[in-house]
Image (spheres, rainbow, N blue to C red):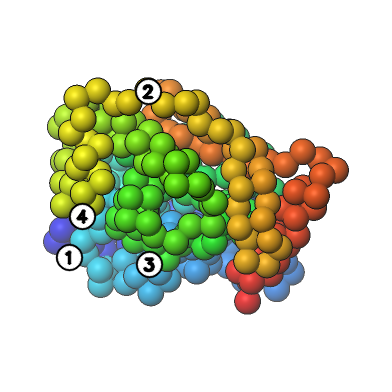
Amino acid sequence: MDRVEAWEFGRTVRRWRDRVAPEAIGVSAGRRRRANGLRREELAALAGISADYLTRLEQGRATAPSTQVVESLARALRLADTERDLLYRLAGHAAPGPDVVPSRVTPSVQRLLDRLSHTPVVVYDATWTLVLANAPYHALMGDTTTWRGLERNAVWRNLTRLPSRVVHTPREQAEHEARLVADLRLTASRYPADRALRRLVADLAGGSARFAELWDVEAPPSLAAPSRRKTIDHPAVGRITLDCDTLLVALDDLRISVYTAEPGTEDADRLALAAVLGTQSLQL
């Protein structure tokens, strides 16, 4: 990207940031608020990047945003398709085509997520890479905004046993890993030209013998249906057993996992307390 394009990219992001009403993303404007739209820190948090990096992008001092950063900014700014494509071009990238795993959260899906703003929700693309998680999810499962690269991929996190609050027996963990890898194989067959997906598979194969074993089986084993119940070991409120329903957005190839508790139960009370404590800690 040359200097003119870099400046235009940052200027465009700044202009679009100014037009996003804080209330549209659940931020209280308040009487003393001077910013017309989103503050830089608010957009950075929504996009999962640092405020310092966003500052450098807007000022044209950072000149090579990745496609992941561009997509995250487009999603956080709630851009229409034509504007999203323009942002890709200003960043020096071609807009994703049908041969690339989509990570686009359409306005209609975003409206659905907005209506679940008080419920823990996490969204993954077809490679099981985290697209977004809302504040109640962070309160329940821990903050994901600092995750970068492979840390954002659920297959990698499970196979390398990165810290998780979800409680699995050894058998449940093994079956969960097998399902994730089997689903990733199907994704790879649908998007054979996606270079990022090929790189992910290579990284997984090089970093996990368990992945290589599961990837190379001729036919994935027949597994019992996954439980819709998950137990989360929360550091402040203890164990919470919740219903976890994963919804597939077919046209956009997204997976949306929603965590709920039956009203009036002890688990519902613990979930509500975890949300309050988590919100307080994120605001500190």
Q: Which mark is residue 54?
A: 3
N-terminal of the pair, mark 3 or mark 2, is 3
As drawn, the label of residue 207 is 4
| Residue name at image x 25 percent, y 68 percent | 62
Q: Specify few, some or many for label 1: CA neighbours under 10 Å numbering under 14, 14-19, or 20 or more.
A: few
Is 26 situated above or below 259?
Answer: below
Q: In percent of the image, x 42 and y 66: which residue is there?
A: 146
Which is more toward the observer, 214 or 73?
Answer: 214
- State which mark lies toward you, 4 or 1: 4
- Mark 2: which amino acid? Ser
Nearest to viewer (mark 1 / mark 3):
3
Q: In the structure shown, which secondary structural element does the residue marked by tag 4 occupy?
A: helix
Foreground mark, 2 or 1, reads: 2
- In space, the residues marked 4 and 2 are separated at their CA atoms by 25 Å
- Mark positioned earlier in the residue sequence (1 or 3): 1
Q: In the rendered image, which quarter is residue 108 located in?
A: top right
Image coordinates for residue 258, horizontal then vertical, percent: 59, 39
Q: How many marks?
A: 4
The spot of residue 188 in percent (x, y) is: 23, 31
The residue that mark 2 highlights is 222
> At 41% across and 37% down in the image, what residue appears?
175
Indicate the secondary structure of the residue bearing disc 1: helix
Q: CA distance from mark 3 to mark 2?
A: 46 Å
Task: Find residue 144 and report its horizontal and vertical position in percent.
Answer: 47, 59
Q: In this image, 87 relative to 146: left or right?
A: left
